[in-house]
């Protein structure tokens, strides 16, 4: 079942065959173990009216995707993702599997899903989805599952054929800007490294500090706080905001290993400060009531230029 279950944490990991997407999956598995999360591995392919099933009947192909090793576009990427989850101990290799299919007009294979359910009811789902474009497919999948976190890799290109991965600017930006949940655009994502959480002192920013500190704790990542003042006169206020954020995290029993105060352009300062961290976290600039230095244009700029992962938190 993909229907939303408000009592379970759900992570959608977009798999495109790149190493970055598999690093993202390992990160999701680390986080998911702490909350007994359901993890959905999603590969989106654009509709292909001319797709052939290699001589097999399509019904047979659907039922034997993994067992037959059929070269349907994307299925081998999902199978590798499943093998990684077995390798890291997130799921047992002998989990019971359930297969389901939804016809998609104009495409011979349609949407296909294999669900693995463990003894603790934790689900791992492999989803091969067809859509008009990749970003729309990811956003449509959120409508089906109502996820708590979406992760997609930011590697620009992969393989000798220079095929596009999920990280083309239009795809990543559309997902990050329009998904109703936190979205992490992952670049060189490491488990057990550090989260750099941006704060501007607003109530929404404080809530982001609380929630992402929990994310960091689940992945055994360190927590650092950063505040940026637009000018020297505003530096005391930024320092106050950072101290309040630090106290919030420490009140949760989580250590803060660094508090950073910067003066200048927020994007430039975050890119520089984030070079030593695994993820930069910023609140969604369009959240109601958020009076931030950040704008949507600055969020996009940060995603494009940062050398580490970026999470837009809403």
Image (cartoon, rainbow, N blue to C red):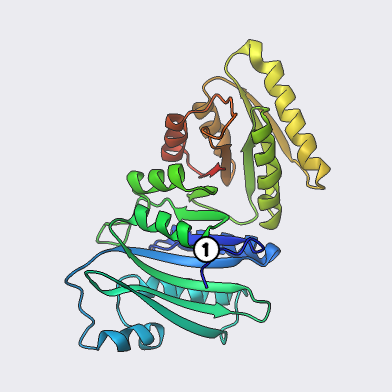
Q: Total number of numbered labels?
A: 1
Q: Residue placed at 76% from the left, 41% from the top?
A: 249
Q: Residue placed at 68% from the left, 32% from the top?
A: 203
> Residue extending furthest top?
233
Quadrant into which the C terminus falls? top right
Tell me: 8 left or right of 152.
Answer: right
Tell me: 50 left or right of 45.
Answer: left
In percent of width and height, residue 111 lies at 35, 71
Tell me: 105 left or right of 271.
Answer: left
Q: Residue placed at 35% from the left, 50% from the top?
A: 156
Q: What element carries label 1?
A: helix
In percent of width and height, residue 16 lies at 38, 62
Q: Residue placed at 80% from the left, 46% from the top?
A: 252
Task: Say if 171 sits above or below 21 in the image.
Answer: above
Tell me: 144 left or right of 134.
Answer: right
Which residue has dot 1 on it?
25
Q: How crowded is mark 1: few (under 14 residues within 10 Å), some or many (20 or more)?
A: many
> Residue extending furthest left?
50
Picture quadrant of residue 239: top right
In percent of width and height, residue 266 lies at 53, 26
In percent of width and height, residue 216 lies at 67, 50
Task: Say if 13 sits above or below 279 in the image.
Answer: below
Of 104 and 88, nearer the camera is: 104
Picture quadrant of residue 136: bottom left
Q: Is residue 165 visible?
A: no
């Amino acid at each position: 079942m993909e229907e939303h279950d408000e009592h379970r944490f759900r992570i959608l990991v977009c798999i495109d065959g790149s190493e970055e997407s598999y690093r993202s999956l390992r990160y999701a598995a680390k986080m998911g173990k702490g909350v007994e999360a359901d993890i959905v591995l999603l590969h989106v392919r654009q509709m292909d009216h001319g797709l052939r099933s290699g001589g097999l009947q399509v019904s047979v192909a659907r039922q034997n995707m993994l067992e037959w090793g059929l070269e349907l576009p994307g299925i081998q990427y999902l199978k590798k993702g499943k093998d990684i989850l077995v390798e890291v101990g997130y799921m047992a290799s002998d989990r019971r599997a359930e297969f389901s299919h939804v016809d998609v007009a104009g495409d011979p294979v349609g949407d296909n899903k294999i669900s693995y359910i463990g003894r603790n009811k934790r689900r791992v789902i492999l989803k091969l989805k067809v859509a008009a474009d990749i970003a729309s497919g990811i956003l449509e999948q959120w409508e089906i599952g109502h996820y708590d976190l979406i992760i997609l890799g930011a590697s620009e290109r992969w393989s000798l054929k220079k095929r596009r991965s999920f990280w083309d600017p239009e795809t990543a930006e559309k997902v990050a800007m329009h998904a109703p949940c936190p979205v992490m655009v992952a670049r060189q994502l490491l488990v057990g490294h550090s989260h750099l959480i941006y704060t501007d002192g607003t109530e929404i920013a404080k809530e982001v500090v609380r929630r992402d500190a929990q994310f960091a704790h689940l992945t055994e990542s360190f927590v650092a706080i950063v505040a940026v003042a637009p000018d020297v006169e505003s530096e005391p206020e930024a320092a106050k905001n950072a101290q309040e954020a630090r106290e919030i995290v420490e009140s949760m029993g989580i250590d803060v290993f660094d508090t950073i105060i910067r003066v200048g352009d927020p994007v430039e300062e975050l890119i520089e400060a984030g070079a030593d961290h695994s993820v930069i976290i910023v609140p969604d600039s369009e959240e109601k009531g958020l009076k931030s230095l950040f704008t949507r244009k600055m969020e996009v700029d940060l995603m494009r230029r940062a050398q580490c992962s970026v999470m837009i938190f809403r």
